[in-house]
Image (tube, rainbow, N blue to C red):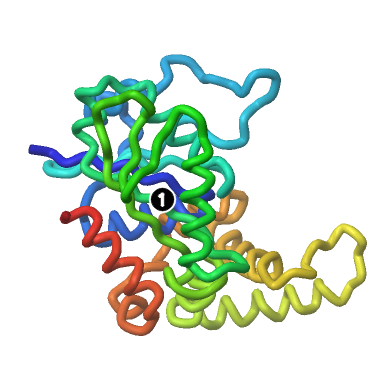
């Protein structure tokens, strides 16, 4: 029987690296054809584009779907680490109980940012617990009043331990996969930071790193969103897995999650 997993990530770059790893390990292939997506997810695929009340929504309401003979994955971008509870509620509440029962596990992926991973996970759990209409208890999530409880796993970039974010991981990978391109991007951003233009927003190390990664990804996929490079280019290889410990941790976590 096919196993179904729901993965909720903080941003589109997170979705890109998870999707790249899913493809690299040949767990499943991405599909944008509705007829190829497992019927379990029918409830969360809108039949018309649902804009947010009075504005165009910058975060797609439709998850990315990955299918194989034995796995079906839905990867949803939350649009920020303060939205996990509401996003989980919006996804699970529209599914019938019989479809909720088909979900073998939920994975929540976020950046540790300026916290240790354990502290960031505690913050996310509190945010989910405080969300009306959804319950968290003993490592399981359920819609309030529903008879279905789904086990949940949390993972924090860059290495599920210390502070930082996905860009820290990508910089480590870039040193292995794209060293000359990464060196050039660092030189450019260093130069840009010294120009003094008021529009620049490079004061924090996080934004400085995002700008470097943005240079690399946009060079490989000009005119396209950064996540297209993170998803399609060779950010994950056997060499990168061998040399980048944080990438191995992500790989090991995902294998354990999908093969439980």
| Quarter occupied by residue 75 | top left
Coordinates of residue 216 in the picture (x, y in percent): 58, 67
Q: At 62% from the left edge and 68% from the top edge, which residue is drawn?
A: 114
Q: Is residue 79 above or below residue 258?
A: above
The reply, left or right, for residue 33 in relation to residue 224 is: left
Residue 177 vs residue 8, the one in the foreground: 8
Residue furthest top in the image? 48
Q: Is residue 255 above or below residue 190?
A: above
Residue labelled with disc 1? 108
Is residue 229 among the parts visible in the rendering? Answer: no
Q: At 21% from the left edge and 42% from the top edge, which residue is drawn?
A: 104
Give the crowd class for mark 1: few <14, some 14-19, many >=20 residues within 10 Å. many
Which of the image's four quarters has the C terminus? bottom left
Is residue 128 among the parts visible in the rendering? Answer: yes
Residue furthest left in the image? 1
Coordinates of residue 59 in the picture (x, y in percent): 56, 36
Coordinates of residue 107 in the picture (x, y in percent): 35, 50
Number of numbered labels in the structure image? 1
The reply, left or right, for residue 17 in relation to residue 179 is: left
Coordinates of residue 199 in the picture (x, y in percent): 87, 58
Residue 134 vs residue 208, the one in the foreground: 134
Which of the image's four quarters has the N terminus? top left
Residue 108 vs residue 235, the one in the foreground: 108
Callout 1: SS: strand
The reply, left or right, for residue 186 in relation to residue 46 is: right
| Quarter occupied by residue 259 | bottom left
Q: Is residue 168 above or below residue 231?
A: below
Q: At 62% from the left edge and 50% from the top edge, which residue is drawn?
A: 223
């Amino acid at each position: 029987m096919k196993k179904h997993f729901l993965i909720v990530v903080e941003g589109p770059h997170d979705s890109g690296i998870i999707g790249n790893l899913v493809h690299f390990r040949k767990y499943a292939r991405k599909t944008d054809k509705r007829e190829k997506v497992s019927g379990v997810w029918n409830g969360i695929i809108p039949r018309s584009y649902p804009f947010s009340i009075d504005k165009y929504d910058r975060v797609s309401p439709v998850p990315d779907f990955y299918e194989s003979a034995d796995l079906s994955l839905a990867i949803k971008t939350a649009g920020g680490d303060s939205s996990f509870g509401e996003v989980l509620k919006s996804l699970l509440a529209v599914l019938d109980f019989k479809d909720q029962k088909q979900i073998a596990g939920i994975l929540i992926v976020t950046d540790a940012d300026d916290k240790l991973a354990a502290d960031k996970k505690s913050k996310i759990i509190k945010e989910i617990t405080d969300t009306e209409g959804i319950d968290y208890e003993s490592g399981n999530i359920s819609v309030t009043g529903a008879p279905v409880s789904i086990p949940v796993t949390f993972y924090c970039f860059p290495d599920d331990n210390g502070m930082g974010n996905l860009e820290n991981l990508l910089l480590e990978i870039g040193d292995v996969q794209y060293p000359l391109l990464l060196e050039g991007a660092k030189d450019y951003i260093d130069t840009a930071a010294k120009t003094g233009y008021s529009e620049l927003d490079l004061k924090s190390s996080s934004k400085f790193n995002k700008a470097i990664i943005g240079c690399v990804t946009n060079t490989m996929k000009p005119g396209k969103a950064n996540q297209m490079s993170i998803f399609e280019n060779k950010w994950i290889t056997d060499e990168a897995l061998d040399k980048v410990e944080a990438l191995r941790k992500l790989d090991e976590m995902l294998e354990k999650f999908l093969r439980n």
